[in-house]
């Protein structure tokens, strides 16, 4: 496809982690090999780690993870890919309706489409300005930092010297806060009840926090503002962290599983579990919550001598391809756009 360059054409690049191309061990191993060789994910000696990874970890984890992916796969393919494809088209439509000349692409740090391929397409489309939005509301060294690395490599590889706005985070953006609070209410959370909210975030190594990563502060700020939007006090909500990569390092806690255990053994409330730092549902939400965390909570309630209700734990889906999510993304990128109906930076 050939594009004609236009004045103030903006390239918008959304970036997320990625997913295997299919739920089979070989495809999962290929995806994990790229993911786990990133220094931001596994900061070990490269040669030694490569040997450990390919000889011991990938053969076992590839099979185990493939079985998990098979549980969440759809007839159309990966739910992760389907949602991102929809977001790309949806955001492009929203920006077009607002008068922006924008080309939107969605790339993956460790999957397809690759960030470099997306950057090349935006360059060939005649974009004169680039806006990069990592789809992680709370920035972290291991996620947002990896996106920054990937975009810089892509710009060098494509030899594209273009003005670039990199949006580090949107953890306290009013539209994002409002959308998360509304999703809890739409899922059935009642202000006038004993319902509790568990904000579950992906954990990160404590070493990253000690090195200056502000992720923990951002998760706390997001949770506090969402709770404030709902109008609930600190007795109705708490924070947990999930998805430790290994047990050889100390990770940010308390862990979501432990929080659920504690609640099950005390008052066993109806829990609304939401993952505000996942923009799109993925293995860590679709599988881990339904097949691991929810059964764990119900078992602990039963072990405490209580009868778990049918909705003892309600998972509140990510924003995914909802209109609310498109509004969040548009409101976040708009201040960095050129053009629009007023013909200037909307700052």
Image: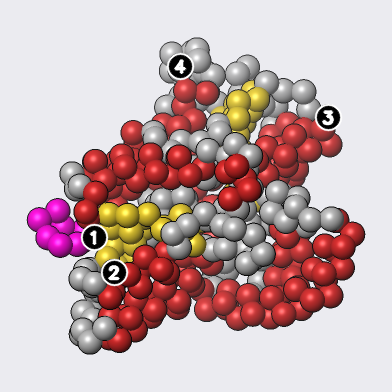
Residue at disc 2, secondary structure: helix
Of residue 24 and residue 275, the one placed in the foreground of this image is 275
Callouts 3 and 2 close, C-beta under 8 Å:
no
> Which residue is situated farthest in the left direction here?
192
Question: Magenta stretch containing residue 90, yes or no?
Answer: no
Residue at disc 3, secondary structure: loop
Q: What residue is shown with label 3?
A: 159
Callouts 3 and 4 close, C-beta under 8 Å:
no
- As drawn, the label of residue 263 is 2
Callouts 4 and 1 close, C-beta under 8 Å:
no
Instruction: In the rendered view, tell whether residue 277 sits above or below residue 4.
Output: below
Camera-near label (2 vs 1) is 2
Between the residue at mark 2 and the residue at mark 4, the CA separation in whole angstroms equals: 45 Å
Image coordinates of residue 289 in percent, x first then y, are 43, 70
Between the residue at mark 1 and the residue at mark 3, the CA separation in whole angstroms equals: 51 Å
Between the residue at mark 2 and the residue at mark 1, the CA separation in whole angstroms equals: 10 Å
Question: Magenta stretch containing residue 193, yes or no?
Answer: yes
- As drawn, the label of residue 196 is 1
Between the residue at mark 3 and the residue at mark 4, the CA separation in whole angstroms equals: 28 Å
Between the residue at mark 3 and the residue at mark 2, the CA separation in whole angstroms equals: 54 Å
Callouts 2 and 1 close, C-beta under 8 Å:
yes
Is residue 122 in view? yes
């Amino acid at each position: 496809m050939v594009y004609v360059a236009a004045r103030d054409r903006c390239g918008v690049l959304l970036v997320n982690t990625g997913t295997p191309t299919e739920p089979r061990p070989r495809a999962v191993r290929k995806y994990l090999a790229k993911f786990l060789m990133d220094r931001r994910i596994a900061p070990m000696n490269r040669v030694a780690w490569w040997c450990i990874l390919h000889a011991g970890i990938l053969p076992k984890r590839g099979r185990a993870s493939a079985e998990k992916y098979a549980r969440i796969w759809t007839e159309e393919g990966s739910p992760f890919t389907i949602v991102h494809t929809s977001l790309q088209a949806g955001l492009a439509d929203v920006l077009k309706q607002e008068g922006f000349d924008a080309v939107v692409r969605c790339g993956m740090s460790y999957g397809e489409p690759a960030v470099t391929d997306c950057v090349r397409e935006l360059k060939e489309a005649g974009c004169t300005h680039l806006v990069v939005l990592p789809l992680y509301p709370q920035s972290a060294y291991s996620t947002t930092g990896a996106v920054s690395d990937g975009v810089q490599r892509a710009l060098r590889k494509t030899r594209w010297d273009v003005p670039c706005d990199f949006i580090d985070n949107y953890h306290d953006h009013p539209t994002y806060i409002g959308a998360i609070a509304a999703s809890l209410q739409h899922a059935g959370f009642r202000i006038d009840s004993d319902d509790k909210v568990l904000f579950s975030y992906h954990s990160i190594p404590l070493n990253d926090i000690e090195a200056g990563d502000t992720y923990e502060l951002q998760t706390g700020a997001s949770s506090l503002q969402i709770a404030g939007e709902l109008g609930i006090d600190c007795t109705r909500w708490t924070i947990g962290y999930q998805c430790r990569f290994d047990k050889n390092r100390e990770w940010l806690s308390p862990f979501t599983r432990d929080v659920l255990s504690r609640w099950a053994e005390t008052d066993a409330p109806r829990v609304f579990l939401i993952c505000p730092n996942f923009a799109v549902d993925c293995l860590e939400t679709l599988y881990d919550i339904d097949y691991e965390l929810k059964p764990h909570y119900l078992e602990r309630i039963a072990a405490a001598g209580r009868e778990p209700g049918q909705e003892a734990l309600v998972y509140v889906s990510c924003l995914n391809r909802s209109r609310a999510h498109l509004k969040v993304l548009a409101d976040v990128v708009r201040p960095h756009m050129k053009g629009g109906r007023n013909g200037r930076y909307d700052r």
